[in-house]
Image: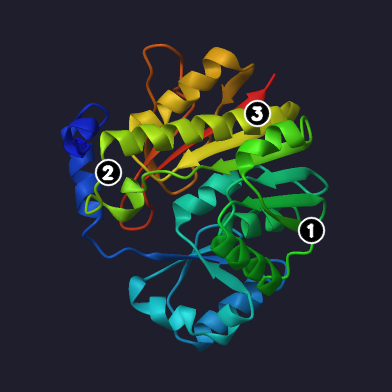
């Protein structure tokens, strides 16, 4: 089976300069992002803890701090980390949850939730009020998810060891908001060291299409959904949305990333207007990501 020619795939999407930025990002030191768990600690107290540990930081927004990579091991060994007061998370992953706009009192679904960082994000945005369903197919990862939710004292969550492809039929029109951070080839996260053949990519894309179909069935009319991946491939991003747009009744919504401290390009399609979907360009802080927000009509 032929291996995927990733360089050619990137040439079809990115300019020479953008491609060079992507390649450089895998070899440079990255800043660390920590997410403050507002369920347990406020900004003033967390900043006091960081200062006492002589950790340099930059506040990005009410939840996030940007920290030099030299402090990574120190962060993970801190008492405050063990107590669930902050979570170490790439900023692009955080943006997926932030983009969903979950609010207190809503019914929200995190479809592929382990290890639990985005579920923690959602619980914070919901102020621990409402209903959060976090689903995971892998038994090992499911127990990691449960442990994360317990450690960070998320009270509104119910964790399910379940194939998310079945949720749409099991829970039609149930959720106000759904986050589908889909399983993918992970090229934007792991770099070009990993190798995938064309058959593997096709299998992954088919899974993503089924997950998105299930999500749209579970979403209420007027509800919103975020579809995201940490890969560059068109087959796993734009093509998945195009497949859904041919068969489902929804529209893409504008993402306001101009204030989100990331560089991005707009998605393109010969068949549909996908310009509201964004490809986050990796740098010394954010991983490469694809993020699209849709509204069910």
First in sequence: mark 3 vs mark 1: 1
Seen at 69% across and 33% down, the residue is 168
Classify mark 1: residues with Cα within 10 Å, few (<14), some (14-19) or many (20+). Answer: some
Q: Is residue 223 left or right of residue 231?
A: right
Q: Quadrant of residue 294?
A: top right
Classify mark 3: residues with Cα within 10 Å, few (<14), some (14-19) or many (20+). Answer: many
Provide residue 243's location: percent of width, then percent of height: 49, 20
Residue at disc 2, secondary structure:
loop
Measure how far apart labels 2 and 1 are at the Cα level: 38 Å
Q: Is residue 224 left or right of residue 220?
A: left
Seen at 55% across and 56% down, the residue is 138
Mark identifier at residue 196? 2
First in sequence: mark 3 vs mark 2: 2
Residue 293 seen anywhere in this rendered image of the structure: no
Q: Which residue is mark 1?
A: 156
Provide residue 196's location: percent of width, then percent of height: 27, 43
The relative height of residue 152 versus residue 201 in the rendered view (above or below) is below
Seen at 40% across and 35% down, the residue is 203
Q: Quadrant of residue 69?
A: bottom left
Classify mark 2: residues with Cα within 10 Å, few (<14), some (14-19) or many (20+). Answer: some
Q: Quadrant of residue 81?
A: bottom right
Residue mark closest to the camera, 3 vs 1: 3
Seen at 37% across and 38% down, the residue is 264
Measure how far apart labels 3 and 2 are at the Cα level: 28 Å
Mark identifier at residue 211? none
Q: Which residue is mark 3?
A: 216
Provide residue 53's location: percent of width, then percent of height: 49, 87
């Amino acid at each position: 089976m032929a291996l995927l020619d990733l360089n050619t795939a990137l040439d079809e999407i990115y300019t020479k300069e953008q491609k060079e930025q992507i390649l450089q990002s895998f070899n440079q030191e990255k800043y660390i992002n920590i997410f403050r768990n507002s369920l347990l600690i406020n900004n003033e107290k967390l900043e006091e803890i960081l200062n006492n540990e002589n950790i340099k930081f930059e506040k990005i927004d009410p939840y996030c701090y940007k920290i030099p990579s030299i402090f990574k091991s120190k962060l993970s060994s801190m008492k405050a980390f063990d107590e669930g007061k902050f979570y170490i998370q790439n900023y692009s992953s955080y943006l997926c949850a932030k983009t969903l706009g979950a609010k207190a009192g809503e019914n929200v679904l995190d479809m592929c939730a382990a290890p639990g960082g985005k579920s923690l994000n959602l619980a914070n945005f919901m102020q621990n009020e409402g209903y959060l369903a976090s689903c995971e197919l892998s038994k090992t990862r499911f127990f990691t998810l449960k442990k994360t939710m317990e450690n960070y004292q998320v009270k509104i969550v119910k964790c399910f060891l379940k194939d998310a492809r079945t949720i749409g039929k099991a829970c039609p029109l149930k959720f106000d908001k759904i986050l589908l951070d889909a399983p993918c080839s992970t090229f934007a996260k792991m770099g070009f060291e990993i190798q995938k053949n064309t058959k593997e990519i096709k299998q992954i894309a088919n899974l993503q299409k089924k997950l998105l179909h299930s999500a749209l069935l579970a979403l209420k009319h007027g509800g919103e959904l975020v579809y995201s991946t940490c890969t560059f491939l068109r087959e796993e991003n734009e093509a998945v949305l195009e497949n859904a747009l041919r068969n489902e009744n929804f529209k893409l919504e504008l993402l306001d990333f101009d204030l989100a401290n990331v560089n991005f390009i707009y998605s393109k399609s010969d068949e549909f207007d996908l310009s509201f979907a964004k490809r986050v360009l990796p740098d010394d802080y954010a991983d490469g990501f694809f993020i699209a927000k849709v509204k069910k009509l």
